[in-house]
Image (cartoon, coloured by chain):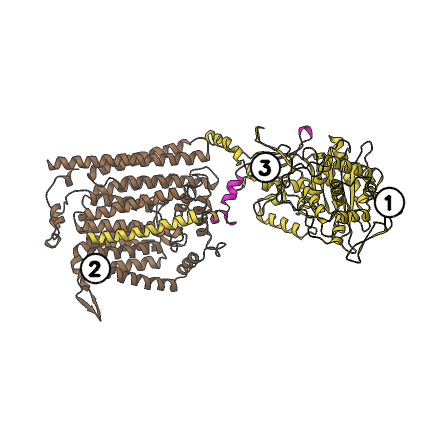
Amino acid sequence: MAKTASAAAARRRANTELGLMVLGLLVVLVAAALVELSQQPDIPEAVLNYGAGFLALSVVAHIAKRRLAPGSDPLILPIAVLLNGLGLVMVRRLDFTGGEQALEFAPSQTVWSAVAVAAFVLTLWFVRDHTSFDDYRYLIGLGSLLLLLTPLLPVIGREINGARIWLSIGGLSFQPVEAVKLGFVIFFASYLAEKRDVLAVATSRLGPIMLPPLRAFAPLVGIWAMGLAVLGLQNDLGPTLLLFGVFIVMLYIGTGRLAYPVVGVLLAAVGAVFAYQSFGHVQNRVSIWLDVWSRYDGDGFQLAQSLFAIGTGGIAGVGLGQGQPGFIPFVRTDFIFSAFGEEAGLLGTTGILLCFVLLIGRGFRIAMRARDEMGALLAVGLTTILALQVFVIVGGATRLIPLTGITLPFVSYGGSSLLSNYVLVALLARVSAPGVPRHTRRRREDDFEDAEDERTAQPSAAGGSS
Amino acid sequence: MSPQIRKVALGLFVLFGVLFLNLNFIAVVQSDDLRTDERNARGLIAEYEIARGAMVAGDGGDSRLVAASEETDGQLRYRRQYPEGATYAHVTGYHSFVYGRGELEATFNDFLTGSAPEAFARNIADLLAGRQRDGDTLQLTIDPATQHAAVDALEGSTGAVVAIAPDTGEVLALASSPSYDPGRLASHDGDEVRQAWNELGERDPDPRLNRAVRETYPPGSTYKLITAAAALESGVTPETTYADPQRLELPLTTASIGNFDGGTCNQGQPITLAEAMVVSCNTTFGQIGLDLGVDRLVRQAERFGLNHEWDFQLPSPAVSVMPEDLDEPSTAQSAIGQRDVRVTPLAMSMITAAIANDGEMVTPRVVRHVEDVTGRVLRDFEPEPLEFDGESRAVSSRTATALRDMMEEAVASGTGTGAQIEGVDVAGKTGTAQTAEGQPPTVWFTGFAPAGDPQIAVSVVITDPGPDATGGGVAAPLARDVMRAWLQDG
C-alpha cells in the first residue's frame, strides 16, 4: 500500500517535471525564433536540427531521471534545462556578432549539452546512493587534488588566455577545476558527515586557542589548503573563492559552530590583503572595480562595456538580436549575463536570477529533507557552490564586487562548466530521491544518531528498482 | 543541521538581494547616463541602422537631393551624404556621430529617423510585417536655382542671404558664407570627423556659424523701414515734410547726426518722408525718431518680431533687438539703425516680406512637408500667420502700400538702383552700418520684386566689403541676382 502510494507520488512529481520542462522549452523556443528572425528571414535547417537535438536531450534527461531517481525533486531539472536552453540561444545569438551568419560556437555548445546530459544520466545510473561515495572518500579527495595539478603537466596541460588551467586531450579542452569543485564537495560532505561530532568539540590546545582534535581535522584542512594553494598559484581567483566559501559553509553546517565561519571570514580578510599585496592581477582587478571609468581606454574597457550593455538594455531590453553584446570582450563566458541585460533588459536578467534563486532554494530544501547527514551536507555544498558561483560572476559583471572570471552556471559558453553543473543537478536529484541506501552494511553505530537516519534504514524496493 | 542550513540559505539569498538591487540601479537609475555616455556606441549604432530620410530641394524636374543615406559595410550601417556639398550646408546642417546634429538634421531628427508620432501607425505595421523602418523625407521650400544664385552672390564674402516668398513664408534661399561641406562631418571615422571639425574651428570667420539665422548685425539704414512704419502708423504721411539741416543736433549732448556725404538731403529745402526714404536721409529719420519717442519705435519693432523669441524650423534663431529705455540721443541714433539695434538677415527678410505681404507677418518655413518613402505625406506645413503678442499684422495695409511705394522709388531713382532688374519693378532699401573706425561697414540690401505683385523678398548682408562700400553699391546687385534667379525660374 505504502509502496504504491509512493510510486504514485513519484509519478505525479515526474509529470509535474514534464509539464515544467515543456513550459521552459517553450520559452527557449520563442527566444530562439526571435534571435533567428532578427538576423535573417528564414531559420536555417541546421539551426532547426540543433533545436530538435536539444529538445531530444531534454526528453532523454527527463526519462532518465524518472526511471533512475523516481520521486526526486521535480523543479531542478526543468530549471537547468531552461537556463541551458537560454544560454544556448544567447551563444547562438552571439555567433551573429562575428559579422558572418555562420554557426560557430552554438554547435559546439549543443554538443556539450549532449555530453552534459549524458553525464547527468550516467551520474544517476552509477550513483544509486550518495552514501556510496563514502567508500571512495580519500580517493575522491586526493584525486581531485591531483586532477587540479594536471594542467601543469606537459603535453596535456594547456595555457589559454594567460591561465594554465586547461587539459587538452584529443582536441577537446577541459577545465579540471570544474570537476574538482564537485570532488571537493563530495569529499567534504562524506568526511564531515562522519567526523562532525568530533570536529564540534575543541579538545586540543594551540597556545591560547582551543582547536578540535588535530587528527580529525588534519586530512580535511590539508586537502582543502592544498587545493586553495594550487588554485591560488594558478591565478584562478574564481574557483579559489568558491572552494574557500563552500568549505566554510559546510564546516558550519556540519558542526553547528559559528566559530568556523567567523574564523573563516577573518582568514578570508587576511588572505585577501595578502593576495592584494602579493599578486599584481588582484590589485589590478580591485583598481578596475574602484574606478572603471578612468580606466576605460585600458583594462576597464570590458567592465565598462558590460555596464553600458546593461544600462542600454534598461528595463525591457533592446530586443533579442537587436543589441551590440559583441562589444564586451569574453561576452560568451564571463559576461553572458550582461548580454541578456542589454537585449532582454532588467526583466530578462531578473528572470534568470529568479531561476537561480529557485534552483538554490530547491537545493537547500533538498538538504533539509535529506534522509542522512551525508546527503544534507552534499546538497548544501553543491547548492552553495552554485549560489556562490552565480553571485561571484553576476556581481563581478555588474561591478558589485571585483571581477573574477568564472562561468555563469548552465548559461555561459563552456563545456566543462555545463558538464559539471549537470552532474551537480544529478547529485541533487539523487539526494532528493527517496531511495534506500544499498550500502547499509557500511553504516556504523555513530551514523544512527538522528531519527532521520533510522527512517531511511527501513528496507524498501525503491532503491533497486532499475 | 536544519537551523544552520536555514541561516546559510538566508545569507545567500541576502547576497542575491544585493545583486538584484545593484542590477536595478544600473538598469533603471543609471540607465540614461550609461545609454547616452559618449563612449557607448550602442545608441548610435541603433540609430545608424535606419536609412536616414532624404532632404529634397525644389520639385519636379529641377529638384535636387541635398541629403541622402548610403549603405556602408561598416559597423554603422548608413552613412549620411550631402550631394550638393557646401551649397545647402546651413539648411541641412550636419549629422555626425561625434558632434551630434545641426540645423534640419537636428530639428527634424524624429522624422528623419522615421520615429515621429505621425509615423507611429506605419511603424507598427512595418514591425508586424517584418519590414525595415525607413526614415522619412523632408521636402524643402528651398528653390535650387535661387539657392545657387544666393551662394554665388556670397562667393568670397562673409555674409548671408535669405529669400522668402512673401505670401506663403516659404524660404526660397538661405545661405551663409563662408560655408563648409557637411559630408566630412558625417564620416564614420572618428578621427577624420574630429580633424574636419577642428579645421573648420580654426578658420576665421568660422564657416560653421549660420549667419543668416544665428547672427545679428547693425541694420543701418534698412532700419529706416521700421522707423517710417512707426511714423506712418502714428499719422505721418509720405508727404509730411521735415526740415533739412546739414546736421541734426541731438538734445542732452554735443553729439549730432550727419548725412552720408556730410551734406543736406534736399539742398536745405523741406523734405517729405517719401523723399527722405529714397535718398536715405539720416537727419530726417533722426528727427522722426525724436518726434515719435522710443516707446513707439520699440512697439513697431516688436510688431515686426524684434525682441521676441519664436520657433523656426531651424534651431534657435537669434533674437533681433531694438533696445528699450533709451535716452533721446540714443533714440534718434536707433531710428537710423545705429547704436545697439541688431537684426538677423532672416528677421530683415521677414520684415520686408511683411511689407510686401500687405503688412501681414507670415511664419517662414524651410520644410514644406514630410513624406514617407512611398510619397504619402505625414506632416504638411501650411502657410501660417506669424503672431507676436497675438497679432500677425505688423502695419496697416495703407502703411504697407506707402512703404512699398517709397522702396520702389528708392530702387528706381535712389540709393538702391543697383538692384534694378530690366522689365521688373523692384522695391528695396539699402543699409550701410559703420561698425568701428577703420573697419569696413556692414552693408545691406533688403527688398522684393515685382513691386506690384511681390513673389520674392530678399535680404543680403555682407560684413567684409571694401573700405568705402555701401549697401547700394555692394549688396543691391547681389540681391538683384537672387531675385532674378527666382523670377526667371518661377
**Residue B57 colored in magenta in the image:** yes
- Vertical order, A232 against B130 (above or below): below
Q: Residues within 10 Å of mark 3 (few under 14, many from 20)?
A: some
Magenta residues (range): B33-61
Rendered residue at 77%/44% (across/down): B224
The chain letter of the brown chain reads A
**Is B21 placed left or right of B422 in the picture?**
left
Residue that appears at 38% across and 52% down? A396
Give the labeled residue for mark 2: A257
- Of tags 1 and 2, the one toward the viewer is 1
Q: Are marks 1 and 3 in contact (CB under 8 Å)?
A: no
Q: Position of residue A15 (x, y in %)?
A: 23, 34
Instruction: Look at mark 1 in the image and give the residue it sits on.
Output: B270
Please name the amino acid that badge 3 sits on.
Ser
The x, y position of residue B454, in whole percent, is 74, 33
- Identify by letter the chain in yellow: B
The answer to whether residue A201 is left or right of residue B168 is left
Q: Residues within 10 Å of mark 2 (few under 14, many from 20)?
A: some
Q: Nearer the viewer, residue A130 or B444?
A: B444
Of badges 1 and 3, the one in the foreground is 1
Which quadrant of the structure image shows residue A229?
A: bottom left
Q: Residue at x 43, y 39 (%)?
A: A319
Q: Which residue is mark 3?
A: B69
